[in-house]
Image (cartoon, rainbow, N blue to C red):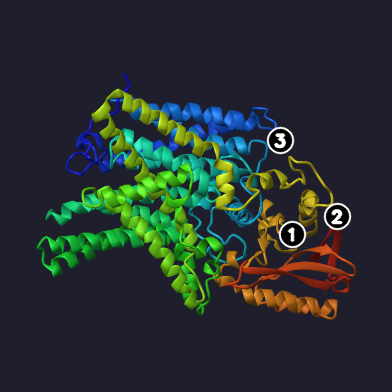
Amino acid sequence: MITITRAPADLSRDSGEFGPAEQRPSPPALLWRLPLSAVVAVLVSLAVQWCLARVDLPHDSFVPEAVLNLACAVLLAGLLGLVALRRWPVGTGPLVWAGLSALATLPLGLLLRGTRFYLFGLGGDQLFRTQYLARLTDSAALADGNYAGLPPYYPAGWFWLGGRFANLLGLPAWEAYKPWALVTMAVAPVVGFVLWSAVVRRPVALLLAVLCCLVGLRVAAYEPYSWVLVVVVVPVAVLLHRDLDGWVAGRERAGRSALVLAGGCSGVCAAVYTLLAFYCAAAVGSLVVWAAARKVRRGARPQVAISGAVARLLLVGLVAAPPALLVWGPFLVARAQLPAAPNPAARFLPQAGAEFPVPMLEFSVSGAICALGAGWVLWSWRRSHVAQALGLLIAGCYGWYAVSVLALSADTTLLAFRAEPVLLTCLFCAGGLAGAEIAERARDQWGAAAVRIALATGLAATLVLAQNIEPALEKSVTPGLVDQAYATYDDTGRRPSGVDTADGGAWNGELIATIDELTGRPPRDVVVLAADPDVLAFRPYRGFQVVSPAYANPLASYEKRRLLVESWARSRTPDELRAALDRSPFPPPSVFVFTRGAGSLRMTASRDTFPHDPGSEPYAVDFPAELFDSPGFSRRDVGPYAVITRN
C-alpha cells in the first residue's frame, strides 16, 4: 500500500514544517551536495541530448509531441511516486537528481531536436546572447559582447562558463548555445531540490522541485541563466528567514550559515544577472530588517537589534563581494573614469512591464495552483515561516512593479516583467505546500484512498502543465520561438527548413569566408559594421554598433556612434570618408557589410524611442556607392550584400 510520509496535519514550524533536523542536510552537507547534484544533472542532460540527436522524428508531425507526452507521463509518475513513499531507499537522491534533469531536458530537447539553434534561433535577444558567448568562447578574458576594447557591462558569469563548456566539447559558440542552455535548465530543478530539502521533508521538496521545473519550462526557458538563479533565490530566502528566527529568539550566533549562503547567492546573482542581484539583495535586506523588528517586539533594545541587523548585512555583503567584483570590477573601474552616461538596458517598457501580473486569476491548471498557493500563504501566515518568507517575496515582486512605474519619472524602468518568474515560482511552491498539507489532512481522515486521489490529481495537473509547454512559453515571450529555431541559417548558410537564396542568411558561409579572406586577420581583430548582424554571432568579430540600444554598453556611447555612422554616409568623396574614419573616437570599422540597393549601399541603424513601444526604431542609412570607388577600399559582392574593407 502506498502511503505518504506521516507527519502532523498542521505543518507549523514546531510540528515539523521543516522536517526533522536529522533529515535536513546541514550547511556543510550542502557544500558537497549542491556541486555533486549539479554534476549529475549536467551528465544526465548531455546523455539525454545525445540520445535525442540520434532519434529520427519528423519535425512537421505530431510524433515528437506524442513521444514527449509519453516520456513526461512516465517521468512525472515516477517522481510523484517517490513523493508518496514513506521512506526513501538508500541512493534515492541521485535517482531523483537524474529524474529531474531528464524532465527538464526532454521537452525542449524534443522540440528542438532537428535544429542546432536554441529557442528563437538568432532572433531577438538570442542574437546578442550568442554573440556574447562567441566572444567568451574565443578567449577566457572578460570582454564586452560586441564592442572592441571595452569591459563587459552585462554580467559575464553564465557566458564565461558557457565558453569553457564550448571549449571542452570542441563546439563553436553558436552551436554550443543550445546544449549549454538545456544543461542550465536541467541543473535548476536539481539544485532547487537540494536546497528545498534543507527546508521541508524530502518528498515535499521533490514536489516543489517538479513544480519549479515545469514553471521554468513554461515561462523562463527563453532566458535560462536567469531561471537557474530564481530557483535558488526562493529556497535560500526561506532558509534565511528560518534561521534568523534563532537570532530573534536571543541566540546571537544563530543564522550565520544561512547568511553566508545568502551572501553567496547574492554574489552569484551579481556575476550572472544584475536585476536578480538587486532583487536578491532587497529580499535579504528585507528579511533581516523584518527579523530585527520582530526582535524589538520581543523586548530587545532597538540599538541591539539595529546593530545586529547591520552586522548580518555586512556579513552578507562580504561574502557576496568577491564573485560580484570579479565580474563587475573592470566595468566599475572604467566607469569611474568617464562622465555619467544613461543605462540603455533599463529603458524598455513592454506591455508585460506595465501590468501587475495576477496569475492566480487565470482560468487554467496553472492559475488554480497559483490561487491555491496565494490562499495558503494568507491562511498560514501566522503559523508558517515558509508562508511568511514566500509572502514577503511575493510582496517584493509587486513592490518591484510599483517602483518600476515610479522610475518612469526618471526616464527609466526596473524591467519589472523580469520579476514575474520569481512571483510564479513562489506561488507554485506555495501551491505545492498547500497540496501537501491538504493530502496530509485527507489521509488522516480517509486513509490510503486519499493518497491515491492526491497522486492521481497531482499527476493529471502536472501532465497538463507538461503537455502545454510550447504554447505557454510562446504566450510568455513571443510566438514562433520553436519555428524560428528551425528557420535560422547556420554559419554555412543552411537550415533544417530548407534554403532560400533570397534570404540573407543563405549567404552566411560566403560572407564569413569573404570577410576572412579580405581582411587576412583573426576574427577577434576585425571590427564589423553590418547591415545584417548575424555574422557577428558565428565568429568572434567585434561590432562597431549593436543592433538595438537595449544591448549597448553604457561605456560605448551608443548615440554618438549612431550619429557618427550617419555623418560618414554624408561624406562627399572617398578621401573625405577615409579621413573621417581615421578621426573616429572609437575603433573604426575594418569591414562594412552593406545591403546592395539601386546606386547606394544600405546600413540599418536604430534610434532610442523609449518609452514608446517598441523601445527602438530601426531606420536605413544609405551610403553612396561612389564613396568606396577608390583604391583605398576593396569590395566584393556576395548575394544581396557588398563586403567592403579598407586597404
Left or right: 156 as drawn, with respect to 574: left
Picture quadrant where residue 296 is located: bottom left
Q: Nearer the viewer, residue 293 or 511?
A: 293
- Helix, strand or loop under label 2: loop
Using the image, determine if residue 187 lies above or below residue 157.
Answer: above
Identify the image quadrant of the C terminus.
bottom right
Left or right: 19 as drawn, with respect to 323: left
Residue 641 is labelled as none
- Helix, strand or loop under label 1: loop
Q: Which residue is found at the position 23% from the left and 30% from the top?
A: 444
Q: Residues within 10 Å of mark 1 (few under 14, many from 20)?
A: some
Residue 60 is labelled as 3
Total number of numbered labels?
3
Residue 639 is labelled as 2
Q: Nearer the viewer, residue 82 or 191?
A: 82
> In terms of sequence position, does the residue under pointer 2 or pointer 1 come before the other?
1
Residue where numbered disc 1 is placed: 532
Q: Amino acid at mark 1?
A: Asp
Q: Position of residue 227 (x, y in %)?
A: 47, 49
Q: Amino acid at mark 3?
A: Asp
The CA distance from mark 2 to mark 3 is 30 Å
One can see residue 271 in this view: yes
Using the image, determine if residue 538 lies above or below residue 44.
Answer: below
- Helix, strand or loop under label 3: loop
One can see residue 167 in this view: no
Closer mark to the observer between disc 2 and disc 3: 3
> In terms of sequence position, does the residue under pointer 3 or pointer 1 come before the other?
3
Q: Residues within 10 Å of mark 3 (few under 14, many from 20)?
A: few
